Amino acid sequence: MAKSSSDTAKRFISKKCPNCFTYMPLKAKECTACHAKLGDVDRFGMASKPTNWHGYFVAIAAWLVFMLYVWWAFLKE
């Protein structure tokens, strides 16, 4: 049976930053040492890394601009 995130959080009193391995409170959203964004604690006591949606949107926009340029430069009659 899979444990929920609240059950996992109840087992730990702190979480560890995945970048610099500093311990911090469970409620912390940012590491005090390296200023990395932190998510919820996993089953090993490590903080999860939140998804960087801004990076995905920038990458998709860059690909769209590149494809538009290729169409304009080579495929447009």
Image (cartoon, rainbow, N blue to C red):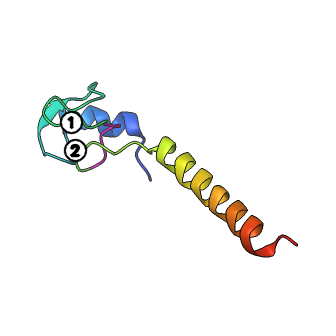
Which residue is located at x 42 percent, y 41 percent? 4
- Kindly state the secondary structure of the residue where label 2 is placed: loop
Percent position of residue 50, x then y: 40, 42
* Residue 44 covered by magenta stretch: no
Q: Position of residue 55 (x, y in %)?
A: 47, 47
Tell me the quarter of the picture where residue 67 sits. Answer: bottom right
Does the residue at mark 1 contact the one at mark 2 (Cβ under 8 Å)?
yes
Q: Residue furthest right?
A: 77
Residue under the point 61% across and 51% down: 61
- Above or below — where is 66 with respect to 11? below
How packed mark 1 is, by other alpha carbons closer than 10 Å (few <14, some 14-19, many 20 or more), is some
Residue wearing tag 2: 45
Residue at 68 percent across and 63 percent down: it is 69
- Number of the label disc, if any, that sits on residue 25: none
**Whether residue 31 is situated above or below residue 55 in the rendered picture:** above
Amino acid bearing label 1: Phe
- Find numbered disc 1 in the image and state the secondary structure of the residue it sits on: loop
Q: Position of residue 20 (x, y in %)?
A: 14, 45
Q: Amino acid at mark 2?
A: Gly
Residue at the image position 43 percent from the left and 51 percent from the top: 2
Q: Position of residue 64 (x, y in %)?
A: 66, 57
- Residue numbers of the magenta segment: 38-43
Q: Which residue is mark 1?
A: 12
Position of 28 with respect to 4 (left or right) is: left
For the residues carrying marks 1 and 2, which lies nearer the camera in this image? 2
